Amino acid sequence: MKIFGITKGQAAMEYLMTYGWALLVIVVVLAALLFINPFRAPEQCTFDTPSFVCGKPLLTADNEHAGKLYGKITNGFSSGIYVYEVICSNSKEAPAPTSTNSIFVPASNDYAINGIECKKDNTAPMSVGEDFSGKLYVYYKLPDDGADFPRRVASATLSAKAQKTTAVAPTNPTGNTNTNTATNPATPGAGNANPGNPTNPDTGSNTINPNTGATSP
Protein backbone atom coordinates (compact mmCIF):
# COMPACT_ATOMS: atom_id res chain seq x y z
CA MET A 1 0.00 0.00 0.00
CA LYS A 2 2.87 2.32 0.77
CA ILE A 3 4.48 1.67 -2.55
CA PHE A 4 1.16 2.28 -4.29
CA GLY A 5 0.80 5.59 -2.41
CA ILE A 6 4.23 6.73 -3.55
CA THR A 7 3.41 5.79 -7.13
CA LYS A 8 0.12 7.68 -7.01
CA GLY A 9 1.82 10.80 -5.61
CA GLN A 10 4.47 10.66 -8.30
CA ALA A 11 1.77 10.41 -10.96
CA ALA A 12 0.05 13.50 -9.57
CA MET A 13 3.33 15.42 -9.56
CA GLU A 14 4.05 14.41 -13.13
CA TYR A 15 0.56 15.54 -14.12
CA LEU A 16 1.12 18.96 -12.58
CA MET A 17 4.54 19.26 -14.21
CA THR A 18 3.06 18.35 -17.58
CA TYR A 19 -0.10 20.45 -17.54
CA GLY A 20 0.69 23.09 -14.92
CA TRP A 21 2.10 25.60 -17.43
CA ALA A 22 -0.92 25.17 -19.68
CA LEU A 23 -3.28 25.83 -16.77
CA LEU A 24 -1.25 28.89 -15.78
CA VAL A 25 -1.44 30.27 -19.33
CA ILE A 26 -5.21 29.78 -19.37
CA VAL A 27 -5.58 31.64 -16.07
CA VAL A 28 -3.42 34.54 -17.34
CA VAL A 29 -5.41 34.79 -20.59
CA LEU A 30 -8.73 34.81 -18.74
CA ALA A 31 -7.47 37.53 -16.39
CA ALA A 32 -6.31 39.63 -19.36
CA LEU A 33 -9.69 39.25 -21.08
CA LEU A 34 -11.50 40.37 -17.96
CA PHE A 35 -9.20 43.39 -17.71
CA ILE A 36 -9.45 44.63 -21.31
CA ASN A 37 -13.09 43.52 -21.80
CA PRO A 38 -12.99 42.85 -25.57
CA PHE A 39 -16.78 42.60 -25.69
CA ARG A 40 -17.18 46.27 -24.72
CA ALA A 41 -18.28 48.46 -27.60
CA PRO A 42 -15.39 50.55 -29.00
CA GLU A 43 -15.46 54.31 -28.54
CA GLN A 44 -17.18 55.73 -31.58
CA CYS A 45 -19.51 58.40 -32.89
CA THR A 46 -20.95 57.48 -36.29
CA PHE A 47 -23.81 59.28 -38.04
CA ASP A 48 -26.37 57.45 -40.15
CA THR A 49 -26.02 60.11 -42.86
CA PRO A 50 -22.94 61.38 -44.76
CA SER A 51 -24.12 64.96 -44.19
CA PHE A 52 -22.51 64.92 -40.73
CA VAL A 53 -19.14 63.66 -39.56
CA CYS A 54 -18.46 63.13 -35.87
CA GLY A 55 -15.02 63.46 -34.32
CA LYS A 56 -13.69 61.15 -31.61
CA PRO A 57 -15.91 61.53 -28.53
CA LEU A 58 -14.59 62.29 -25.06
CA LEU A 59 -16.91 61.48 -22.16
CA THR A 60 -16.02 62.66 -18.65
CA ALA A 61 -17.52 61.88 -15.25
CA ASP A 62 -17.03 62.86 -11.62
CA ASN A 63 -19.20 60.20 -9.90
CA GLU A 64 -21.61 62.94 -8.75
CA HIS A 65 -23.21 64.41 -11.87
CA ALA A 66 -24.28 63.37 -15.35
CA GLY A 67 -21.53 62.60 -17.84
CA LYS A 68 -20.19 65.43 -20.00
CA LEU A 69 -19.52 64.91 -23.70
CA TYR A 70 -16.87 66.77 -25.69
CA GLY A 71 -16.03 66.57 -29.38
CA LYS A 72 -16.97 68.10 -32.70
CA ILE A 73 -19.44 67.60 -35.54
CA THR A 74 -18.49 68.58 -39.09
CA ASN A 75 -21.11 70.01 -41.43
CA GLY A 76 -20.97 67.85 -44.56
CA PHE A 77 -23.64 69.79 -46.44
CA SER A 78 -22.70 71.92 -49.44
CA SER A 79 -24.23 74.92 -47.66
CA GLY A 80 -24.40 76.25 -44.14
CA ILE A 81 -26.89 74.91 -41.62
CA TYR A 82 -28.56 76.20 -38.47
CA VAL A 83 -27.92 73.94 -35.49
CA TYR A 84 -30.52 74.37 -32.75
CA GLU A 85 -29.53 71.71 -30.28
CA VAL A 86 -27.38 68.62 -29.78
CA ILE A 87 -28.68 66.03 -27.30
CA CYS A 88 -26.90 62.96 -25.92
CA SER A 89 -29.23 60.21 -24.73
CA ASN A 90 -29.60 56.43 -24.59
CA SER A 91 -33.39 56.57 -24.90
CA LYS A 92 -34.93 54.61 -27.78
CA GLU A 93 -36.74 57.65 -29.15
CA ALA A 94 -35.30 61.05 -30.02
CA PRO A 95 -35.86 63.52 -27.14
CA ALA A 96 -37.86 66.66 -27.84
CA PRO A 97 -35.58 69.69 -28.41
CA THR A 98 -36.08 72.71 -26.18
CA SER A 99 -33.77 75.40 -27.57
CA THR A 100 -35.21 78.17 -29.76
CA ASN A 101 -31.81 79.67 -30.58
CA SER A 102 -29.64 78.46 -33.43
CA ILE A 103 -25.98 78.60 -34.37
CA PHE A 104 -24.99 78.97 -38.01
CA VAL A 105 -22.37 76.45 -39.12
CA PRO A 106 -20.88 77.10 -42.59
CA ALA A 107 -20.27 74.23 -45.00
CA SER A 108 -17.32 72.00 -44.06
CA ASN A 109 -17.01 73.78 -40.69
CA ASP A 110 -17.21 72.23 -37.24
CA TYR A 111 -19.75 72.54 -34.46
CA ALA A 112 -17.97 72.18 -31.12
CA ILE A 113 -19.55 69.96 -28.46
CA ASN A 114 -18.43 71.49 -25.18
CA GLY A 115 -19.71 69.43 -22.27
CA ILE A 116 -23.31 68.54 -23.07
CA GLU A 117 -24.93 66.15 -20.58
CA CYS A 118 -25.07 62.42 -21.26
CA LYS A 119 -27.49 60.66 -18.93
CA LYS A 120 -27.73 56.89 -18.75
CA ASP A 121 -31.38 55.84 -18.46
CA ASN A 122 -32.16 59.51 -17.69
CA THR A 123 -30.44 59.21 -14.32
CA ALA A 124 -27.37 60.77 -12.76
CA PRO A 125 -24.62 60.52 -11.69
CA MET A 126 -22.24 58.75 -14.08
CA SER A 127 -19.23 56.98 -12.64
CA VAL A 128 -15.65 57.14 -13.90
CA GLY A 129 -14.99 54.05 -16.00
CA GLU A 130 -18.67 53.53 -16.79
CA ASP A 131 -19.58 52.58 -20.36
CA PHE A 132 -22.15 54.65 -22.24
CA SER A 133 -23.97 53.46 -25.37
CA GLY A 134 -26.62 55.67 -26.89
CA LYS A 135 -27.36 58.27 -29.54
CA LEU A 136 -26.25 61.79 -30.37
CA TYR A 137 -29.11 63.80 -31.87
CA VAL A 138 -28.53 66.96 -33.93
CA TYR A 139 -31.53 69.23 -34.52
CA TYR A 140 -30.98 71.59 -37.45
CA LYS A 141 -32.46 73.50 -40.38
CA LEU A 142 -31.26 74.29 -43.87
CA PRO A 143 -31.12 77.90 -45.13
CA ASP A 144 -34.20 77.44 -47.35
CA ASP A 145 -36.35 76.00 -44.55
CA GLY A 146 -39.06 78.43 -43.53
CA ALA A 147 -40.25 79.36 -40.06
CA ASP A 148 -43.01 76.73 -40.18
CA PHE A 149 -40.73 73.99 -41.44
CA PRO A 150 -40.08 71.40 -38.70
CA ARG A 151 -36.57 70.99 -37.44
CA ARG A 152 -34.63 68.21 -39.07
CA VAL A 153 -32.86 65.64 -36.94
CA ALA A 154 -29.81 63.47 -37.59
CA SER A 155 -28.58 60.82 -35.19
CA ALA A 156 -25.24 59.20 -34.53
CA THR A 157 -24.45 55.95 -32.76
CA LEU A 158 -22.39 56.89 -29.71
CA SER A 159 -20.36 54.69 -27.40
CA ALA A 160 -17.72 55.92 -24.97
CA LYS A 161 -16.15 55.17 -21.61
CA ALA A 162 -16.38 57.88 -18.97
CA GLN A 163 -13.00 59.28 -17.99
CA LYS A 164 -11.81 61.43 -15.14
CA THR A 165 -10.13 64.18 -17.07
CA THR A 166 -10.26 67.84 -18.02
CA ALA A 167 -11.60 68.16 -21.55
CA VAL A 168 -10.39 70.81 -23.98
CA ALA A 169 -12.74 72.26 -26.57
CA PRO A 170 -11.75 71.42 -30.15
CA THR A 171 -9.91 74.16 -32.02
CA ASN A 172 -9.74 75.06 -35.69
CA PRO A 173 -6.62 76.20 -37.58
CA THR A 174 -7.36 79.86 -36.79
CA GLY A 175 -7.35 79.21 -33.06
CA ASN A 176 -11.05 79.75 -32.39
CA THR A 177 -12.65 77.42 -29.86
CA ASN A 178 -15.64 77.16 -32.20
CA THR A 179 -15.48 77.20 -35.97
CA ASN A 180 -19.13 78.22 -36.10
CA THR A 181 -18.55 81.81 -35.01
CA ALA A 182 -19.26 85.15 -36.61
CA THR A 183 -15.62 85.33 -37.77
CA ASN A 184 -16.22 82.65 -40.39
CA PRO A 185 -17.46 83.45 -43.89
CA ALA A 186 -21.07 82.59 -44.65
CA THR A 187 -23.84 83.52 -47.00
CA PRO A 188 -25.67 86.49 -45.46
CA GLY A 189 -29.34 86.19 -44.59
CA ALA A 190 -31.91 88.53 -46.04
CA GLY A 191 -31.67 91.99 -44.56
CA ASN A 192 -28.65 91.08 -42.46
CA ALA A 193 -25.68 93.40 -42.68
CA ASN A 194 -23.34 90.96 -40.94
CA PRO A 195 -22.11 88.44 -43.56
CA GLY A 196 -20.67 86.13 -40.91
CA ASN A 197 -23.80 85.70 -38.83
CA PRO A 198 -26.91 85.06 -40.97
CA THR A 199 -30.47 85.39 -39.78
CA ASN A 200 -32.35 82.67 -37.96
CA PRO A 201 -34.95 81.11 -40.32
CA ASP A 202 -37.45 80.89 -37.46
CA THR A 203 -37.22 84.36 -35.96
CA GLY A 204 -35.54 86.49 -38.62
CA SER A 205 -33.04 87.69 -36.02
CA ASN A 206 -29.31 87.16 -35.90
CA THR A 207 -28.10 83.85 -34.60
CA ILE A 208 -26.46 83.48 -31.22
CA ASN A 209 -22.70 83.88 -31.06
CA PRO A 210 -21.49 80.66 -29.35
CA ASN A 211 -18.51 82.41 -27.78
CA THR A 212 -20.41 85.22 -26.07
CA GLY A 213 -23.98 83.96 -25.92
CA ALA A 214 -25.18 87.33 -27.27
CA THR A 215 -26.86 88.14 -30.56
CA SER A 216 -24.98 90.08 -33.17
CA PRO A 217 -26.18 93.62 -33.82
Image (cartoon, rainbow, N blue to C red):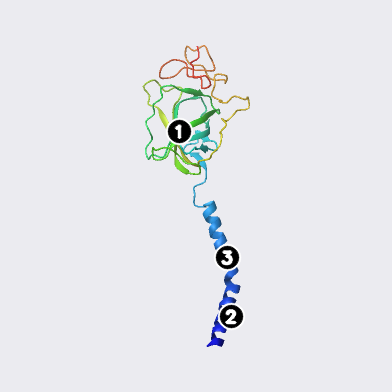
Whole-angstrom CA distance, mark 2 to mark 1, is: 64 Å
- The amino acid marked with disc number 1 is Glu
Whole-angstrom CA distance, mark 1 to mark 3, is: 44 Å
Of callouts 2 and 1, the N-terminal one = 2
Q: Position of residue 187 (x, y in %)?
A: 52, 19
Whole-angstrom CA distance, mark 3 to mark 2, is: 21 Å
Q: Which residue is mark 3?
A: 24
Quick one: SS at disc 3? helix
Q: Are marks 2 and 1 in contact (CB under 8 Å)?
A: no
Q: Who's the residue at 54% across and 57% down the image?
A: 31
Q: How many marks?
A: 3
Q: Are marks 1 and 3 in contact (CB under 8 Å)?
A: no
Give the label on residue 117, or none.
Answer: 1
Image quarter for residue 97? Answer: top left
Q: Who's the residue at 63% across and 27% down the image?
A: 173
Q: Which residue is mark 2?
A: 10
Of callouts 3 and 2, the N-terminal one = 2
**Label 3 CA crowd tier, 10 Å (few <14, some 14–19, many 20+):** few
Of the two numbered discs 1 and 3 in the rendering, the one whose residue sits closer to the viewer:
3
- The amino acid marked with disc number 2 is Gln
Of callouts 1 and 3, the N-terminal one = 3
